[in-house]
Image: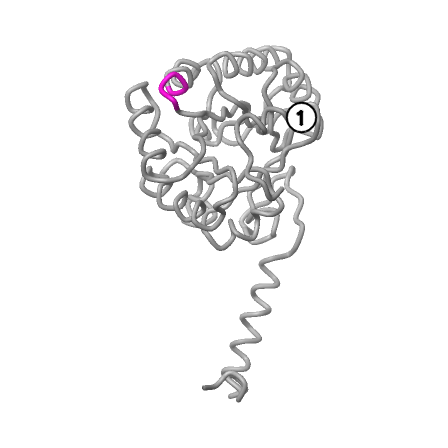
């Protein structure tokens, strides 16, 4: 995965191989992730894992631009997706103004918009003005307060039909791919088969066109809660604590720095 993906190459993976997406918020981690991922998402999830907030809603355009710039610097060979934060695309004019800021002020390759049918006009307006859009349907983190929590979608026939309409509306509006979050696996699989663009899952089973995880979840660094769909590939928090404690113990014991660490 060393060659940078394009919208065309991303779309050509559908039915061929799964896409690998991971979040990153800074240059350091982006550089570490670049060789193993197709796409790096600068998610507004940074508002929780980096800023310590209870949800994503207070993330600002300035935050997203700052972190997207950092990721682009660290992973110059990655296809970078910038989340449009809550309140930044409530109407066509604001959406275009803010998306243009992403394109002008960072090297991001596209923006991500939450919502299906209800946001199709926004997506179409952006794509008609030269902005590449990744859609996002299913569980929408920016709607967590209005929905009273993080609720799995696709549990009944009404939700299934709504999700199918959302996916087709996002595709028709011009999105080149979409994320589907927190959806029953069998429904997510049906949705992936119903559209021609890649559908990248998070908490949506394996029978979609790719997967995305928040890096601080998968590395075991974020400890407040662990969603059911997250696999922890390491206990990062314990490893970091242990390393820092070793450092502190050596400082207190006068064992660091030794001669080899001294000019």
Report the span colored magenta: 126-130
Query: Dot 1, crowdedness within 10 Å: few (<14), some or many (≥20)?
Result: many
Q: Is residue 126 left or right of residue 34?
A: left
**Residue drawn 32% across and 29% down?**
100
The quadrant of the picture occupied by the N terminus is top right
Q: Does residue 127 show up magenta in the picture?
A: yes
**Residue drawn 40% across and 13% down?**
121
Image quarter of residue 112: top left
Image quarter of residue 162: top right
- Which percent across, then down, holds residue 25? 46, 47
Q: Is residue 245 left or right of residue 129?
A: right
- Which percent across, then down, holds residue 252? 50, 84
**Residue drawn 47% across and 35% down?**
81
Q: Residue furthest front?
A: 3
Dot 1 corresponds to which residue?
Answer: 208
Q: Secondary structure at mark 1?
A: loop
**Residue drawn 60% across and 40% down?**
227
């Amino acid at each position: 995965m060393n060659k940078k993906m394009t919208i065309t190459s991303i779309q050509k993976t559908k039915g061929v191989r799964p896409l690998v997406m991971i979040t990153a918020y800074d240059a350091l981690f982006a550089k570490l992730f670049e060789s193993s991922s197709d796409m790096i998402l600068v998610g507004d999830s940074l508002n929780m894992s980096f800023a310590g907030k209870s949800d994503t809603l207070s993330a600002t355009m300035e935050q997203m631009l700052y972190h997207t710039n950092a990721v682009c610097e660290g992973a110059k060979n990655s296809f970078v997706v910038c989340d449009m934060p809550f309140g930044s695309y409530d109407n066509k004019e604001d959406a275009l103004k803010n998306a243009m800021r992403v394109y002008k002020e960072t090297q991001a390759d596209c923006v991500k918009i939450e919502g299906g049918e209800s946001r199709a006009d926004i997506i179409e307006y952006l794509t008609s003005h030269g902005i590449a859009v990744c859609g996002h349907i299913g569980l929408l983190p920016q709607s967590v307060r209005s929905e009273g929590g993080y609720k799995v979608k696709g549990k009944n026939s009404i939700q299934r039909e709504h999700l199918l309409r959302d996916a087709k509306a996002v595709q028709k509006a011009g999105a080149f791919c979409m994320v589907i979050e927190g959806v029953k696996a069998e429904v997510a699989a049906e949705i992936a088969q119903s559209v021609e663009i890649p559908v990248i899952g998070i908490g949506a089973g394996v029978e979609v066109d790719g997967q995305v995880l928040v890096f601080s979840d998968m590395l075991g660094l974020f400890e407040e809660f662990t969603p059911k769909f997250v696999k922890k590939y390491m206990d990062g928090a314990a490893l970091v604590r242990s390393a820092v404690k070793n450092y502190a113990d050596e400082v207190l014991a006068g064992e660091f720095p030794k001669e080899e660490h001294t000019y």
